[in-house]
Image (cartoon, rainbow, N blue to C red):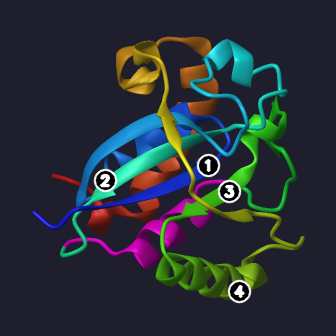
Amino acid sequence: MNYRTATFGGGCFWCLEAIFKDLQGVVAVVPGYSGGHVENPTYKQVCTDETGHAEVLQITYDPDVIGYRELLEVFFSIHDPTTLNRQGGDIGSQYRSVIFYATEEEKETAKDVMTRMADLWDDPIVTELTELSIFYPAEDYHHDYFALNPQQGYCQMVIAPKVVKFRKEFQERLKS
């Protein structure tokens, strides 16, 4: 297979994972950390806001089914790219809006999508665009968090409404 990966951060990785897993063409979604200066950080370390890492997803996708540009369009529709170091009640640099690109083509595509999406927001987009250096997978208990913990308060109050909204807006792009 000719699979590719994309690495995005847009707040809590539990929220993003629940959404991207539903998309046609997405083969795997792994929550993790990137963009910091500590090797093999733990969730506890990242939450101190001192490692420099963002909570991110590494998305493996089939480019014959969904393209990088489409992934970016979904990304920008499911989080607020205008808030610096926060998403809703989640505050800290680990929740920043960030795209980690692996190629110059991805970088240029991201710039183009950000320019086109800028008019959708009242405030300027503050999404960081950074070359991917290393991705660290999160601890096992973060994987499939929403699916495994639907009754947890954060899942019910924050993630579930985002998933419902996403499924309505992207119905034609969902896995069956």
Q: Amino acid at mark 2?
A: Thr
Mark in the foreground, 4 or 3: 3
Q: Amino acid at mark 4?
A: Thr
- Badge 3, how many Cα within 10 Å: few under 14, some, many 20+? many
Q: Quadrant of residue 6?
A: bottom left
Whether label 2 touches label 3, CB < 8 Å: no
- Badge 2, how many Cα within 10 Å: few under 14, some, many 20+? some
Distance from label 2 to label 1 (Cα)? 15 Å
Judging by the rendered image, the residue that carries numbered circle 3 is 98
Across and down, in percent, residue 119 comes to 76, 84
Label 3's element?
strand
Distance from label 4 to label 2 (Cα)? 25 Å
The earlier-in-sequence mark between 1 and 4 is: 1
Please provide the residue range marked out in magenta.
Answer: 65-79
Q: Amino acid at mark 3?
A: Val
Distance from label 1 to label 3 (Cα)? 5 Å
Q: Is residue 152 visible?
A: yes
Q: Residue at x 87, y 52 (%)?
A: 84
Q: Residue at x 9, y 63 (%)?
A: 1
On the picture, is 19 further left or further right than 159? left
Whether label 1 touches label 3, CB < 8 Å: yes
Judging by the rendered image, the residue that carries numbered circle 4 is 115
The earlier-in-sequence mark between 4 and 2 is: 2
Q: Is residue 75 magenta?
A: yes
Judging by the rendered image, the residue that carries numbered circle 2 is 60
On the picture, is 158 further left or further right than 60? right
Q: Which mark is residue 9?
A: 1
